[in-house]
Amino acid sequence: MTKFKELLQNSFSLSGLAEEHAHGLSEIAQPMSLKSGAVLFKAGDPGNGCYAIIEGSMKVSVVSVDGSEQLLAVLGQGSLVGEIALLDGSERSATVTALKPSQLAFISKAAFYRYADENPAVYRHMLQIVATRLRRSNDALAARSFLPLNGRVAQTLLQLSETFGKQVDNHKILVHYKISQAEIANMAGGARENVSRVLNVWKREGVISRLSGYYCLEKPEVLRAAAEL
Amino acid sequence: MTKFKELLQNSFSLSGLAEEHAHGLSEIAQPMSLKSGAVLFKAGDPGNGCYAIIEGSMKVSVVSVDGSEQLLAVLGQGSLVGEIALLDGSERSATVTALKPSQLAFISKAAFYRYADENPAVYRHMLQIVATRLRRSNDALAARSFLPLNGRVAQTLLQLSETFGKQVDNHKILVHYKISQAEIANMAGGARENVSRVLNVWKREGVISRLSGYYCLEKPEVLRAAAEL
DNA sequence: GCCATTTTGTGACCGGGATCACAGAGATAT
DNA sequence: ATATCTCTGTGATCCCGGTCACAAAATGGC
């Protein structure tokens, strides 16, 4: 078995798929790699498949005419991107860009359906993923209308901790991912300057800290309270 | 065949499912009816199935502690509600309320998976629905961060026209659904008063009009332009 | 190390839209 | 028809957070 397929299988297992299907899918996927900053596809492009992230990380965003962007998600190893267009047959709904040099596996629409029709577990798994994303998206929308900026920043940090967090100590969470204020601001939907202010208040209160460039959530409860709808 | 099953089958066909599966699903669904204003379920409730709307209309919303609400969608005949919790096995993500006396069909989680495993087309259809919803939700989120109030109101009107619109004349669209400014405001994420102002400007410019209580989009292009990201 | 570039921190100002406060205008009921 | 509600229109005020303008740290390349 090639190195690629091995990595890929791990990636699929990691995302919660049974060994058997991880193997099957890795057989039909095409390897590809992207250098940091490269655009995988843009909103509006035709979409004929989806990608699994084997290694690296990608951002999913929507950009407006004036150039400002709204980040919908930052995804890492084991995540799937580009499913929406695959599933509803329409154009790509957002733009996906590599944040680091990344290894991807492309799964074409035809291959996906061919395989999944034989293995309904794959459909169930995909439904799980999409449903969870829909839930997230709805939550973010609700946050936008109910929460003031600090609440949205809290929500963003917690969301990042779900994908990149490592438990340390009792309940401290280290977000093992380099992220700039600008990116947090784009996810939370606020101006970078104001996000900076919010983060500093929390830093002073000991709610968060920075350990060698990484954010560390010292008191996640406080953040959870702030993100409460 | 009972009247209920007949209606139900129509409902499923209406939502784009093949005749055969519309029939199959109608066999496993439980009829139920709700009076206007009744709550089907609340965010946080456990969820063990989903519902198809046979007749009537429902609103999907999230409410904050202080009582204000964000409408995620208004759904009519042929739509599915409550899929998220069914699919990701978590609690209900939003609150669903009947806006009119409604007829529903309940499909339990077990029954759904039992049937769908045998009929992958049902999975494909479900993925379609959920993917489209995710796309919508992402669009709404992007709108929230890029568009000023009038753009979001435009988006809301267009969205309603997708579900309840009837073409009349050349390109005028009648939104065949009684809706108050307050509800539009809750969908667009703005204060009712400001939504009123926006709507009146458009009314004066002949972009929209009201025909016996229903909104009519006289110049959908103008609205589409205003909702452009 | 040293300079260039990217991030971060903070103050000052300003504006879109929330909020408050009512006055019409339609509905619904009796 | 009259009273009661619930919707709609509009002005006045206020504040959160966006924007501008820099200074101070980091970070990274050579």
Image: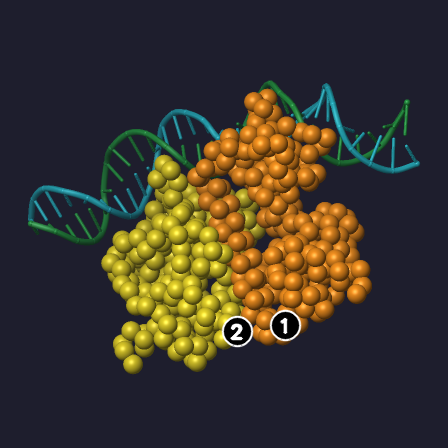
Chain colours: A orange, B yellow, C green, D cyan
> In which chain is the residue bearing label 2?
B
Q: Quadrant of the C terminus of chain A?
A: top left
Residue B169 appears in view: no
Which residue is located at x 61 percent, y 42 percent?
A160
Q: Position of residue B58 (x, y in %)?
A: 34, 58
Badge 1 local density, few (<14 within 10 Å), some, or many (20+)?
A: some
- What's the amino acid at mark 1? Tyr
Residue at which label 2 appears: B120
In this rendering, would C20 be left or right of A21?
left
Return the x and y of residue C18 as percentages of the image width and height: 41, 36
Determine the residue positioned at 35% across, 70% down. B29
- State the SS at label 2: helix
Relative to B100, is B120 above or below? below
**Looking at the image, which is closer to me, A208 or B76?**
A208
Marks 1 and 2 on same chain: no
Residue B130 drawn above or below residue D23: below
Quadrant containing the N terminus of chain A is: bottom right
Task: Tell me the residue that label 1 is attached to.
Answer: A115
Real-space Cα separation, disc 1 to disc 2, in angstroms: 11 Å
Amino acid type, residue under disc 2 in the picture? Pro
Q: Is residue A104 above or below residue B152?
A: below
Question: Which residue occupies 53% across, 62% down?
Answer: A127
Pinpoint the chain carrying mark 1.
A
* Residue A148 marker: none
Instruction: Tell me, yes or no, whether the two marked residues, 1 and 2, touch with CB atoms within 8 Å.
Output: no
Q: Position of residue B87 (x, y in %)?
A: 48, 59
Q: Residue at x 72, y 47 (%)?
A: A99
Q: Nearer the viewer, residue A51 or B176?
A: A51
